[in-house]
Image (tube, rainbow, N blue to C red):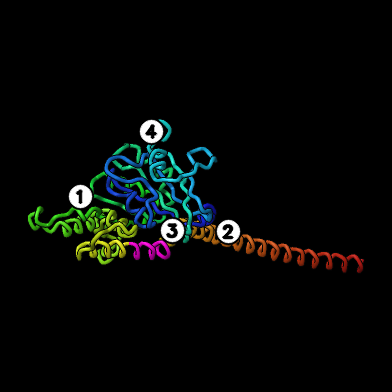
Amino acid sequence: IQEAVARNYMKVVFIGRTSAGKSTTINAMLHARILPSGSGHTTNCFCLINGTKESQPYLLAPGSNERRPISAVEQLANALSDSERLMPDSLVDLYWPTQNCHLLENDVVLIDSPGLDISQDTDGWIDKHCTDADVFVLVSNFESSLSRTEARFFQRVLDKISKPNIFVLYNRWDTYDEEENGGKDVPGQHRRAAEDFLVNELHLHGSDLLPSRVFFVSAKESLQRRLGRTAALTPIMDTRYKQFQSFETNFEECISKSALATRFSKHVQAAEEMCEEVDTSLAQVTTRLTVAVETVKETIAAQTDALRRLETKWSEVACRASEV
């Protein structure tokens, strides 16, 4: 409990398979190209993004206190892709100026993770970096359905966290073509899959909460728009951008309210159980003390009565002795 209270920031972990768009999503939320992103395997390890009051960003490699300056995303990409030095469960600390990122000013740290499909040791990842997370953001490519990989990951999380907060982002909707999909209701299919995943399988939310937990976005478009690199906006692009903004609104509300309850709920439950045990023990001690007190009272009463009888007999003996 003391360790949880001592942590004075909210921890958010971005999870998903390789090339789902986790890094791009973080970049879009921070309004800057902080993390390297693109097709293929670009994030080789965990990267924890902290806010700093300093004007220049820097990173700390695992096991080192040496500040390494980062002047370009390409340099960071080289650092995060150095497979000879960084294992998938390694953690790089990246410090980014809070003056450039509103979200980092609010005591929030973001963790970008390697793809869930690059290693079988997800249990080790969870134990090492995710057990104390306040919020999880599952980023999924819209072309793929939620798989057993994600399900196994969050089942493992459930063993550690009583009721984690999970957002599901179906990303890359800018590449979705309704005509190519034969008019199929692909968004509806994904909504039903998310409902089955969050409500029926993980038992985390009710169906009424899904609109505030499941979103269809284009992180790439959102980032480009915020960097001023979008030439012309179309109505469908505006719709996707509003979905991303809706995700951010619900996300910030979650980390400021419900995540606090999630963060301490397991500790509160443990404390309640401890209090119940102490209360039961105190009740047992009280009962035993009451019985012991009554026994002592009875013993004292009996001894007092015996003493009185003895005094009476001595008085009688004294009287007879006087007469003699």
Give the residue type that dot 1 points to. Answer: Ser
Give the residue type that dot 4 points to. Answer: Ser
Mark nearer the N terminus (3 vs 1): 3
317 left or right of 272 in image = right
The residue pinned by badge 3 equals: 101
Mark nearer the N terminus (2 vs 4): 4
Residue 220 covered by magenta stretch: no
The residue pinned by badge 1 equals: 145
Q: Secondary structure at mark 3?
A: loop
Mark nearer the N terminus (2 vs 3): 3
Q: Where residue 83 is drawn, which disc sits there?
A: 4
Q: Residue furthest left?
A: 182
Relative to the observer, which residue lies in front, 254 or 67? 67
Q: Where residue 285 is drawn, which disc sits there?
A: 2
Span highlighted in magenta in the image: 248-258
Mark nearer the N terminus (4 vs 3): 4
> Going 53% across and 61% down the picture, which residue do you hit?
279
